[in-house]
């Protein structure tokens, strides 16, 4: 304990922790994690915590994963980093080719975190219209309760009051469209009808403002930071049609939902025929977003990397003799070889282990087990692939913190969002580990409610 004490107080002295009112730690101790093993995080006293939030939604295949670790080690022996302006390397080329094949979006621009990917997509969209003789298309729209990151541009299209309100005076203006999150629907309305009604609202707005609109940015299928707000996929299809019809870009922010989280490799293609090659879609329409933002799970949770993918038509609008028509954006670690090698190892696991298919059984098992939670006062029990959530009916204003603290005592890491408890575990979670996760949650609810 005394060993912990010193690292804890040193951390509070010197480290400004993210998303935290630091004074809170007068009552809540930090947890000093020493190592990871699969779904488990292990602290200095060898106490184990099941990481049911994949360490902020980044870890796909467990901590200390031998395949990802070995790929990084191998890369480390040849090239740790080189600037990507004027230079290239095999890992970044291979990763770009693989992502192009998976998404149908053939041009990859890299950065290091999700918020930067949002910034890049917004700037590229604006710049595309400028290069295309439409300099008035300067505005962006997003969904009510959206989350796209916390740098100033990304915060401008984010709609979460606790992150946004303080900085309102600094932010670019954007309009928010009604969210199709089915929790917001009328009682007698199906999720599909509600999604269609929200899409009609979107169309009304876009039809009136398209001459000023550059892009609509959206989190496909699940608004994660809003408390795992899920919606019917018909909304995505309609959004794609509306954006095409009125010449507004569609930016798919797959930073949280990409890489299998919602049950398909990318949530944008949830309804797509698996045989679709993006050239001859059986639905005879181009379902691709104009931009796709990826990060979080892209390296399996090992190294910071993000990416904006876009299509040839957009890329070509920048290709010119004039430097200013080019996209003159950069980050120091753009396309870092170690991060790209971790991403390639992550994609290799998807292929060799048939992850999308095997996750179906895992998701079904989680859903069955979660029936045990229906004895508590909960509502909106919901699932989408490897995301499960429910809202607890309680008037306790400290519910989220109380649950978080009680869960840690039982060896479980959850971070409820308001009254929403969610599970977003690594895909390597086993059935006994799922049992543990649910049983610990039962104990937490018994204590907190
Ligand atoms: C996490 C997240 C971001 C921001 O990514 P960071 O790496 O935290 O900057 C953006 N959009 C969505 C949907 C996210 O979940």
Image: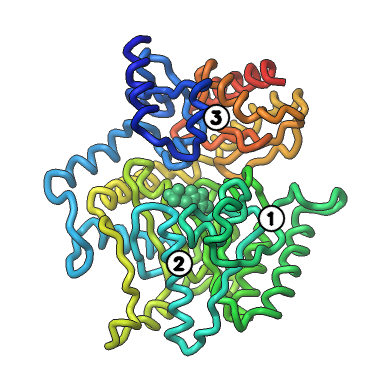
CA gap between label 1 and label 3 equals: 26 Å
Q: Report which residue position mark 1 lands on.
A: 232
The disc, 1 or 3, on the residue closer to the chain's N-terminal end is 1
Residue density around tag 1, few if under 14, some if 14–19, many if 20 or more, within 10 Å: many
| Residue at 50%, 36% in the rendered image | 20
Q: Which residue is nearer to you in this view: 154 or 222? A: 154
Q: Residue at x 50, y 22 (%)?
A: 26
Rendered location of residue 273, percent (x, y): 55, 62
**x, y (%) of residue 363?**
57, 37
Q: Where, by quadrant of the figure, is residue 199 drawn?
A: bottom right
Which callout, 1 or 2, points to the residue nearer the camera? 2
Q: Is residue 256 above or below residue 387?
A: below
284 to 385, vertically: above or below = below
Q: Residues within 10 Å of mark 3 (few under 14, many from 20)?
A: many
Counting from the top left corner in percent of width and height, residue 302 is at 33, 41
| Count of numbered badges drawn on the protein | 3
Task: Give the residue number, with chain letter if any, for mark 2.
Answer: 121
Q: Is residue 53 visible?
A: yes
Q: Secondary structure at mark 2?
A: helix
Residue 385 appears left or right of 87 = right
């Amino acid at each position: 304990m005394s060993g912990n004490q010193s690292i804890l107080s040193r951390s509070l002295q010197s480290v400004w922790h993210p998303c935290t009112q630091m004074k809170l730690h007068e009552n809540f101790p930090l947890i000093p994690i020493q190592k990871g093993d699969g779904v488990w995080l292990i602290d200095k006293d060898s106490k184990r915590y099941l990481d049911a939030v994949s360490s902020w939604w980044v870890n796909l295949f467990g901590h200390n994963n031998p395949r990802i670790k070995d790929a990084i080690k191998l890369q480390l022996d040849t090239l740790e980093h080189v600037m990507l302006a004027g230079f290239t390397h095999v890992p970044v080329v291979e990763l770009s080719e693989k992502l192009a094949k998976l998404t149908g979006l053939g041009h990859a621009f890299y950065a290091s975190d999700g918020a930067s990917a949002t910034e890049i997509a917004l700037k590229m969209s604006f710049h595309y219209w400028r290069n295309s003789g439409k300099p008035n298309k300067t505005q962006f729209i997003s969904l009510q309760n959206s989350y796209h990151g916390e740098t100033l541009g990304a915060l401008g299209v984010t709609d979460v009051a606790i992150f946004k309100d303080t900085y309102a005076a600094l932010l670019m203006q954007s309009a928010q469209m009604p969210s199709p999150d089915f929790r917001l629907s009328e009682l007698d309305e199906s999720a599909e009808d509600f999604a269609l009604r929200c899409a009609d609202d979107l169309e009304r707005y876009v039809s009136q403002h398209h001459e000023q609109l550059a892009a609509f940015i959206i989190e496909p299928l699940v608004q994660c930071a809003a408390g795992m707000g899920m919606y019917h996929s018909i909304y995505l299809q309609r959004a794609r049609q509306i954006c095409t019809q009125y010449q507004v870009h569609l930016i798919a922010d797959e930073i949280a939902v990409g890489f299998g989280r919602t049950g398909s490799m990318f949530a944008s293609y949830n309804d797509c025929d698996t045989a679709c090659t993006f050239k001859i879609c059986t639905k005879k329409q181009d379902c691709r977003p104009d931009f796709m933002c990826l990060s979080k799970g892209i390296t399996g949770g090992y190294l910071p990397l993000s990416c904006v993918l876009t299509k040839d038509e957009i890329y070509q609008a920048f290709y010119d003799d004039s430097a200013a028509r080019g996209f003159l954006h950069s980050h120091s670690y753009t396309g870092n070889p170690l991060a790209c090698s971790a991403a390639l190892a992550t994609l290799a696991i998807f292929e060799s282990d048939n992850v999308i298919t095997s996750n179906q059984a895992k998701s079904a098992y989680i859903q069955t087990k979660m029936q045990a939670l229906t004895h508590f006062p909960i509502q909106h029990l919901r699932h989408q692939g490897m995301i499960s959530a429910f809202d607890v009916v309680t008037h306790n204003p400290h519910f989220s913190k109380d649950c978080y603290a009680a869960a840690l005592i039982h060896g479980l890491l959850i971070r409820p969002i308001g009254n929403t408890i969610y599970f977003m575990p690594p895909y390597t979670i086993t059935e006994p580990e799922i049992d543990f996760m649910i049983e610990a949650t039962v104990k937490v609810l018994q204590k907190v409610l």
